[in-house]
Image (spheres, rainbow, N blue to C red):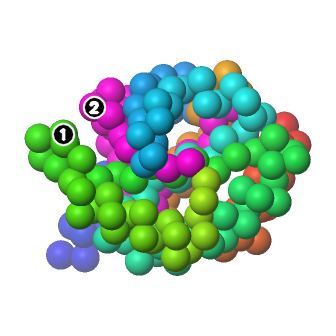
Amino acid sequence: MKRFLIAIAFLAFSSLTFAQKAGEKITFTATDLKGAAVTSEIFAKNKVTMLNVWGTFCGPCIREMPDLAKLNNENKNKGVEVVGIVIDILDRKGNIDSRVKSSGEAIIAQTGANYTHIIPSKEMFSGVLRGVQAVPTTIFVDSNGKQIGEAYLGSRSQKDWQKIIDEILKK
């Protein structure tokens, strides 16, 4: 049984890391939580964008959001921006679930995560979010909209994320 569970976990992780590959261009059109249009052109204004896929139901996601807010503020002058994607905001028909949206807005206010949060479009689910099976999942993107490295699964501390960001900026 244990081997079976390990095999399932490996398959889930494999599909996550191969959902979007390093060097692939990410394109999308969506809106943010405030209703403003957001496209993949958001990547052009920074050297690096940290896309953090999170859910309102996810404790580790919520616990890392204050650190992500600090990272966003402390790295702006280096050309780094954090952008959240609220994965669970749409219902099964693709409409915004107002209760989940309200919960997401409350979480953002509570954690101080005042960076851009995107409501995923159908296009994003067949593109950049294809295969994301766990949250938080984080993807780094360059100014050309190309994914840098593989996706990171799980939450990390501000210190650990900063090390990753610093390594990416060295390249």
Asked if residue 127 lies in the magenta stretch, the reply is yes
**Extreme-left residue of the structure:** 93
Quadrant of res 113: bottom right
| For residue 86, above or below residue 64 | above
Gap in angstroms between the C-alphas marked 2 and 1: 7 Å
Q: Quadrant of residue 161?
A: bottom right
**Local secondary structure at mark 1:** loop
Which residue is disc 2 drawn over? 122
The quarter of the image holding the C terminus is top right
- Which residue corresponds to mark 1? 94
Which residue shows up at 43% across the image and 48% down it? 33
CB atoms of marks 2 and 1 within 8 Å: yes
Q: Is residue 118 magenta?
A: yes
Please state which of residues 157 and 16 is positioned toward the viewer in this rendering.
Answer: 157
Does the image show residue 92?
yes
Is residue 20 toward the left or the right of residue 48 in the image?
left
Residue 155 at x, y percent in the picture: 54, 68
The residue drawn where x is 64% and y is 31% is 43
* Amino acid on which disc 1 is placed: Gly
Q: Residues within 10 Å of mark 2 (few under 14, many from 20)?
A: some
Q: Which residues are magenta?
A: 116-142
The quadrant the N terminus occupies is bottom left
Depth check, front residue: 143 or 149: 143
Q: Residue 44, percent across and down?
A: 69, 25
Q: Residue at x 81, y 49 (%)?
A: 76
- Which badge, 2 or 1, comes first in the chain's sequence? 1
Q: Which amino acid, mark 2?
A: Lys
